Amino acid sequence: MTPVLELRGITKRFPGVVANDHIDLKLEAGEVHALLGENGAGKTTLMNILYGLYSPDEGEIFVKGKPFTPKSPSDAISAGIGMVHQHFMLVPVFTVTENVMLGDEYVKRGGILDRKRAADRIRQISDQYNLFVDPDVYIKDTPVGIQQRVEIIKLLFREADILILDEPTAVLTPQEADELFKIMENLSRMGKSIIFITHKLREVLEFSDRITVIRGGKVMGSVTPAEADQNKLASMMVGRDIDLDIDKKPAKVGDTVLEIKDLMVADAHNHLVVKGVNLEVKAGEILGIAGVQGNGQTELVRTVTGLMHPVSGKITILGKDTTHASPQEIIELGTAHIPEDRQKDGLVLPYPITDNLILNTFYKPPFAKGGMLQEPEIAKNARELVKNFDIRTPSIETPVGTLSGGNQQKVIVAREFSRPIKFLVASQPTRGLDVGSIEYIHNRLIEKRDEGCAVLLVSTELDEIMQLSDRIGVIFGGKIIKILPAKGATKEEIGLLMAGIDSETKTPDSQPVSVG
Amino acid sequence: MTEPEQNTPTPAGKSEKPAKASKPNAFSIFLEEVSRNSLTVTILAIVTGLLLGGLVAVLTTETVYEAFKFSFGYGFSEAFRVLGATYSALFTGSFGQPAVIRAAIASGDWQQINIAFSPFFESLVQSTPYILAGLAVALGFRVGLFNIGAEGQIFVGALAAVWAGTHIHGLPAIIHAPLALLIGGLGGAIWGFIPGLLKAKTGANEVINTMMMNYIAFRLSEYLLTGVLKDPTKAHPISATVDTAAWLPRLFPTPNRFHVGFFVALLLAYLVYLLLFKTTLGFQLRTVGFNPNAARYAGMSIVKNTVIALSLSGALAGLAGANEVLGVNRNLGVAFSSGYGFDSIALALLGNSHPLGVVLASLLFGFLRNGALRMQLQAGIPIDIISIMQAAILAFIAAPGIIRTIYRLKEPKVTVADPVLSTKLKEQQP
């Protein structure tokens, strides 16, 4: 049978870098084909070539056996190829219908939009593939998972049969991701072919029919899930042996470093989102907070680090009441914080690496003397940290905005770990990172714990929590519903807790409460 | 208005050369920044703006049309005559007439030389308030604040300086003049502090509040100039002349008005550069400007830095007003309004919000404005042509795509470490 899509010897060079080096790829009808590779491996470039955004320097593309040279996305669309970008291209103030028909509008006589006919079509597509999308809601009122389905509907609406999904799970909660995979399964059963780009090993093994691994612009191999396991794929991706299992020594637990009592926090809309949290983190242990995104983790972390203030309750760090302390006072106590959103909170993107590395120590010697910045010391600090923390950069003057996500995260880790700290708050420390960086950051976290640092780890990646933590607290609906030792805890047990089901009480509790 | 966060170039505070290599100075950093924004585009924008102004001058001159009625060749020669006259008047008006300068030097008479060079020095005098007010706006931009109230701060600075010059007596000049300048700066600082505090404490938009503070300043000046500050011997609202001790000394005899204020402005440009790029306070200010979230995360106080930034910005604008009053006018009338405060927004943009860039942009505007006076007298070209030139230059700076299209320049190359990001950046470029 002819493959629906075939790439032969695709090569694309950018100044100083070969992004794609003679890539061959075959996509069969009804296949879910995973394109696996680290950030910067060339996956997105390849898909952009296929989508007509770039033209290849060499190589040929065949769609259903016929040569295909896309000049623009519209060529790709008319050839039945559709792409869901990592960042959705939706207009928030438009309804689902309006977004879907944007660029392919149904019109009545006189140029009036025929919303009803388009909405019917969307309803029909939604039913056919079990997408559960209401065509009349506004995009701004829908969760990310639904927005992604709207993007998929956009493609189906244009009768695409080759769907490209670029890092589709990066923005989803584990539950949403599972639903997405169910949808992908439906789509492939109905004859659609899917390429999904990712760097997450687990989902590749579980949900794809074939896996092509790309590294440094080259195809490293094409395997079926049955032939591979996580460590093998990781090694293919990174080019060296990767050990994803973490051996850690038993925790040497010391004094209590963080103590939270009856903490209540309200969000910007005055809704209580943290509803009476009690926690203790001791020196030398990692307390992992597991939970689905949006259950109060963000606010909990922001309150502990002084970026938000609680409605009531008490926070003590190293014996000092920090309930209403400023971020600086909390930093001064020896607290480090790896923020959830590294680009928003953790870095000043236009600043060079040098300045980002002194973001919270700039006023201290040796970086400052008499209010003047000491540039030689700042540069020296940067050179040392770039070396010690393996930050890949052309120079210490490179703006961090131009670094890859993994290296950006390393800049933060370098900054936070290079000062004497006793308490570490790490929020989603490996979100969006490639395998090599994840391994690196995990090892560093364990290292800090072994040095006697108290670590509060918040992550929506259950695997990460289970691997790193000594104790696991499960947050649901703004409450820590259970704290259990990591040893002996099972994924199923925690998964149920994350959904608010405590095997002992079986009473989910998620009533929103407003204050004031 | 685009967000200053996007507009301001990345700071290139420290160059990574080994400590022994020449220390990066303001100029090298400026060059680096402008080159990132493409120096070629800036220069071509200026040249194109000047050409466009000349074209408008030709198109608005009646003799050109009359000449064209007569014959085509005659029309063209008249058009070129007008064009030549415009630029030559602009040049001699701002730099002086070469023939006069040669003759004066040949004569060896100091007063003649002084007179011959006075257009050049007058251009510097014109540039001085531009520099100070431009620095005020640029400082705000660096902190992500849009201080649109420089004009009002200039007024309050001028009022405060005039008060200090007319109500404090008996001080020696060495104390009185700096004191009057300082008080002027303080006046402007208060005018910046108020919207700064409102922004920091209540989140009130500084664009609105600095603008509203302008109107309060205008009316305040009318009130004071018809009241407390009014010269009782005059019929119209104008202040008394400030004490000679408070004058900013002029360096040459009349008619040359060049005064020490120019050097004060240059010194302040240097201080602003040091503040922004070499001090811990400047580090905080710039961080707040680029990414307030990260600033908060790192323990910096947004409230404190916003208030400091707008106060300093106001102080610089206030100094521009004080400088005019103490160095040039020596009294203050209600018609003092110069528009410096509004031009300064343009200067900060043209100068890339960098102190050295602001100085260069201010010199350009100062020389143009001064040359325009002679252009009007000599070539009969209305002074407004200069405003058209300035506006065109700014439009080209703000929309570099126009310049790139006219001169078929290539898009600036994106060179970044990460190939994926680099392609993403390329995609984002228009």
Image (cartoon, coloured by chain):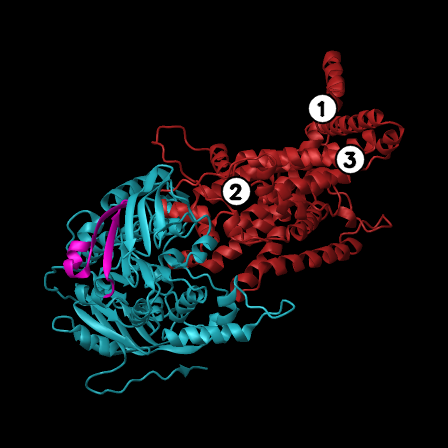
- Tell me if residue A167 comes above or below residue A369 in the rendering: below
**In which chain is the residue bearing label 2?**
B
Is B287 positioned to the left or the right of B326 in the image? left
Query: Image quarter for residue A480?
Result: bottom left
Instruction: Name the amino acid, label 1.
Output: Phe
Is A119 positioned to the left or the right of A449 in the image? right
At x 18% / y 72%, what residue is drawn?
A491
**In which chain is the residue bearing label 3?**
B
Discs 1 and 3 lie in a common subunit: yes
The first of marks 1 and 3 along the sequence is: 3
The magenta region covers A207-233
> Which colour is chain B painted?
red
Is B287 positioned to the left or the right of A257 in the image? right
At x 20% / y 71%, what residue is drawn?
A472
User: In the image, residue A70 lies at what x, y percent?
Assistant: 43, 49
**Chain ID for cyan:** A
According to the image, label 3 marks what residue? B57
User: What is the CA distance from the residue labelled 1 to the residue labelled 3?
Assistant: 27 Å
Residue B178 visible, this orientation:
no
Is label 1 or label 3 in front?
3
Q: Which label is found at residue B117?
A: 1
Between B312 and A379, the one nearer to me in the picture: A379
Helix, strand or loop at disc 2? helix
According to the image, label 2 marks what residue? B272
Between A354 and A129, the one nearer to me in the picture: A129
Instruction: Name the amino acid, label 3.
Output: Ala
- Tell me if residue B135 comes above or below residue B108 in the rendering: below
The first of marks 2 and 3 along the sequence is: 3
Between A383 and B194, the one nearer to me in the picture: A383
Say whether residue A303 is magenta.
no
At x 25% / y 70%, what residue is drawn?
A289
Check disc 2: other Cα within 10 Å, few if <14, some if 14-19, many if 20+.
Answer: many
